[in-house]
Image (cartoon, helix red, strand yellow):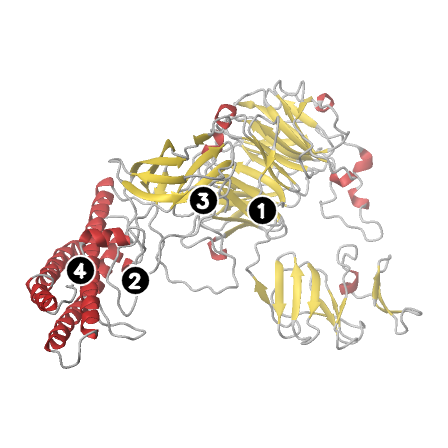
Amino acid sequence: YTVGEAKKTSLSRSDDQGTTWTNVSSAAEVGSRPFYFNTLTVDPKDYNKIFKPGFNLAISKDGGKSFQNAGGQYHGDVHALWVNPVDTAVLYMGTDGGVYRSNDSGQHWIQIRNLPVSQFYHVSFDMKQPYDVYGGLQDNGSWTGPSQGVAGITNADWQNTGIGDGFWTFADPASPEIVYAEYQGGKVSRFNLRTKERQSIQPLPKAGEPKYRFNWNTPIELSPTTPNTIYIGAQFVFRSRDRGQTWERISDDLTTNDPKKLQQDDSGGLTPDNSSAENHCTVYTIAESPKDPQLVWAGTDDGNVQVTTDGGKSWTNVTANIPNLPKFTWVSTIEASPSDRATAYATFDGHTTGDMKTYVYKTTDLGKTWTSLATDSMKGYAHVVREDLVNPKLLFLGTEHGLWFSLDGGGSWAQFTGKFPPAAVRDIAIHPRDMDVVIATHGRGIYILDDISPIRKLTPDVMQSDVAFLEGKPSEVKFGAQIQDFPGDDEFVGANRPEAAFITYWLKERHVTGDFSIQILDAKGTLITTLTAGKRKGINRVAWPMRLKPPKVPSGAQIEGGSVFGPVVPEGVYTVKLIKDGKEYLGKVTLVGDLTLSHSAKDRALQQATVMQLYGMLERLGYIGEAVQSLKKQVDERAAGLKPDDPLKKDLGAYSDRLDAFYKTLVATKEGRVQSEEQLREKLGLVYGDVNGYAGRPTQAQLDRITVLNGEVDKANQAYTALAGADLTTINDKLKAKGLQPVTPLSKEEFDKKNSAAGSQMEAADEREFSRIGVYLR
């Protein structure tokens, strides 16, 4: 079978290996956009059954004479299909909306939702706590989702804000429930997240005006200086002062307006195609200076860089001032410097003419002169450049092959590797409060580079130091989420920022041999924990989970679930001591309360004091339990060496039974998958787990219960004291009389030493796995 594109596109069939052909069908399903949908798939077991991807999936069962659309629901624009050669009822289909599977020859479909392969064009954020991200997807609308979810970021956490091919999407800074979303060809709308109302606010030509030429990926820009002000570009730049209710044209045609490039109506050759993706000579990027609302930059897809310093009354084309740039190269981004009015950056993309070079430039005089920042180390044509909001020498560059950064204003560049893929980076946004870099990739979704404040401090002087701490922003003490949800494995879940404080430091050279560790000390100088230090040359980031080790509790038939996590450490400033070859380097890390919660400092302090009281009670109980077990083990060992009729063996057995009976009052020991028995460990662990899992003030019932349980721990201690006191003395006297080794009680010091490096019932249950990489990406 073959589809031949012609004035009347048709499906042809050969039954003699291509010697002769017969036109079988010219149905609409066959001729739908043939230059775009050109894949045919034949059922491996039935050569008369044909699948023809197109706007929908068409299926023929009679050798192509007739077609009908597949059943079920799926995203349109079908590009790929695979038929299982063993069970041909099983189909896999690739569309602009993802991958689908059918088990019944295309009558119903299941979307495969665990593939993190979304194609974002642009990304932005709001100022919520935690903030949401916003972005547009290739043929999948525009969306907003949280940067931090309850238990990771699931598909269900995202809200749709726009339709079609999603491109630029912004939340209104003054009214966060209002979102501006643009889809193909300048179709921009104002969307209300609460009511779901959507109003088109696209500028429309007035009497006597030419047709507006909007790029497929039309730029919209929210003013960084003036509320309610928006820009949008066609061949002109438009500005609205009232959130899109009215528009004013603030430029003439800023493009080359070349008639040879304005033949959209004739686009497509044999099959005319006029979708607005064919528009050329359009404004593609707009940037208002954060330092001056009268200063606006615009770049076009046919190579013009234009600037106005008087709010649009006059414009200057500065393209000719850019050295070694081929004419008419697409201006992919202009970045107006957040630190200096006269400074701007521009990237250019020549790949549509076969030019794969990286073009990135900087001007410091409003475009009169430009300097190339590109280096031989770069790969891929450039999509976007951003200057850091705090350190103007820190730059980020997105190309078709990854993310790059410079610490010296563009003199030299390094590529982010490690956990960041070499995917196309289409947009970059820097959060001013959280100091995160939010990255839109075309193919691998959105990444967040957490807390770049350490990178901002990486100056040339610092890099000459053997060791230097790069202090980050204060770390929030998180308590984790408590939800019940079992979504299965068919959905991708984005990672939250880990519940950890990060210690970031610079090593001039890789540490190879000798001592190297990190100690965390509280304000009194007490050692809290020791961490393994990252040894790599350059930036190291080590995670401190901000929790003490789980309490050591008596072991039982089941794990006591309430006490498998240690308490979070109190808020405050902690000293970080890096010990390298006997030398000590001091830094600090600051912990603050969870900024998303409203608990008062007084209530948080009570929670911390209460959980530490419970922690101490569990440790006391843990000591009693282990001490009892130690006594029983020794007594049983002594008894095992005695003859059956020895009276001492009977006395030791009776003492062992008393120890065992006492231990069973401390912890549930009955075997069984479901443990309904409650002893002191379970009662105490229940309250500890509840208090430990909530950041605010404990309930009065919990506080009262602690008083009761503390009394029970005291009674248990008294009972143990009796067993390990006079009762044990009697046993030891009899052992000594026979020349046997006396039984020695476990001291508290021995218990503490033994368990100082150990976990609880689960070995290091709260020590999560953290990767020490140059920077933390999620």
Give the percent coordinates (x, y) of residue 611: 23, 50
Q: Upstream in the sequence, badge 1 or badge 4? A: 1
Residue depth check, mark 4 versus mark 2: number of the one nearer the observer: 4
Tell whether label 2 touches label 3 (CB within 8 Å).
Answer: no
Q: Upstream in the sequence, badge 4 or badge 3? A: 3
Residue under pointer 1: 136
* Secondary-structure class at tag 2: helix
In the picture, measured across the screen, residue 126 lies left or right of residue 27, that is: left
* Secondary-structure class at tag 4: helix
Residue under pointer 4: 624
Above or below for 116 versus 53: above
Residue type at tag 1: Gly
Residue under pointer 2: 561
Residue type at tag 4: Ile
Above or below for 359 versus 519: above
Residue under pointer 3: 177
Q: CA distance from mark 4 to mark 2?
A: 20 Å
Q: Upstream in the sequence, badge 4 or badge 2? A: 2
Q: Within 10 angstroms of label 4, few (less than 14), some, or many (20 or more) residues?
A: many
Q: Upstream in the sequence, badge 2 or badge 1? A: 1
In the picture, measured across the screen, residue 276 lies left or right of residue 527, that is: right
Give the percent coordinates (x, y) of residue 124: 52, 40
**Visible in this render: residue 252?**
no
Q: Residue at x 32, y 74 (%)?
A: 673
Work out whether residue 526 or residue 706 is closer to the camera in this orientation and state it. 526
Residue type at tag 2: Gly
Q: Upstream in the sequence, badge 3 or badge 2? A: 3
Q: CA distance from mark 4 to mark 3?
A: 57 Å
Tell whether label 3 touches label 4 (CB within 8 Å).
Answer: no
Work out whether residue 143 or residue 163 is closer to the camera in this orientation and state it. 143
Tell whether label 3 touches label 1 (CB within 8 Å).
Answer: no
